[in-house]
């Protein structure tokens, strides 16, 4: 998931860089934040199952939302407004790839073709 996300960000970022270097940086940075968020979410889910501490899980989730939500606004302030969309496209790329991987694994393990 992480490798495919980074490959996507670099390839699309090179195309976007011709229009706006800040937009390309926003996409690549968004992908990095998306990968970090995915790994932090997975770790939070594991800790929730191990310790059953819902309050810790909620607080860490809120902190992630705040931190990763401030970043695209900064890009939009220093570049074109659409850089916020580029950030979010990168941010949700790891999630989309992970969902595809899980879906494919579930179909394969259930014998569905």
Image (tube, helix red, strand yellow):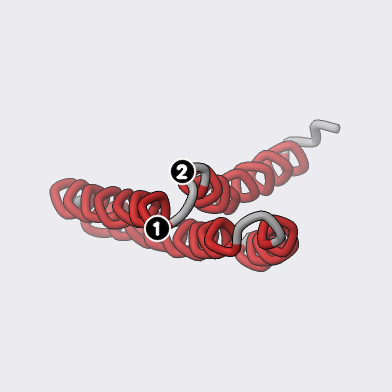
The residue that appears at 50% across and 51% down in the rendered structure is: 87
Left or right, 31 with respect to 55, comes to right
Q: Nearer the viewer, residue 49 or 11?
A: 11
| Mark 1 surroundings within 10 Å by alpha-carbon count, few (fewer than 14), some (14 through 19), many (20 or more) | few
| Mark 2 surroundings within 10 Å by alpha-carbon count, few (fewer than 14), some (14 through 19), many (20 or more) | some
Label 1, on which residue? 78
Q: Is residue 82 above or below residue 68?
A: above
The residue that appears at 22% across and 58% down in the rendered structure is: 51
Left or right, 109 with respect to 74, comes to right
Q: Quadrant of the C terminus?
A: top right
Residue 14 sits in quarter: bottom right
Secondary structure beneath label 1? helix
Percent across and percent down for residue 89 are 56, 46
Q: Nearer the viewer, residue 25 or 47?
A: 25
Q: Is residue 3 above or below residue 95?
A: below
Q: Quadrant of the N terminus?
A: bottom right
Q: Any mark on residue 14, and which?
A: none
The residue that appears at 64% across and 60% down in the rendered structure is: 5
The residue that appears at 46% across and 43% down in the rendered structure is: 81
Q: Nearer the viewer, residue 4 or 68?
A: 68
Label 2, on which residue? 81
């Amino acid at each position: 998931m992480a490798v495919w996300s980074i490959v996507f960000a670099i390839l699309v970022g090179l195309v976007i860089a011709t229009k706006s270097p800040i937009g390309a940086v926003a996409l690549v940075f968004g992908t990095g934040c998306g990968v970090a968020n995915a790994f932090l979410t997975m770790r939070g889910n594991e800790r929730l199952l191990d310790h059953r501490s819902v309050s810790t899980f909620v607080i860490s989730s809120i902190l992630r939302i705040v931190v990763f939500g401030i970043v695209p606004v900064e890009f939009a302030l220093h570049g074109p407004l659409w850089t916020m969309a580029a950030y979010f496209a990168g941010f949700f790329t790891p999630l989309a790839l992970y969902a595809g991987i899980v879906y494919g694994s579930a179909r394969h393990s259930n014998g569905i073709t």
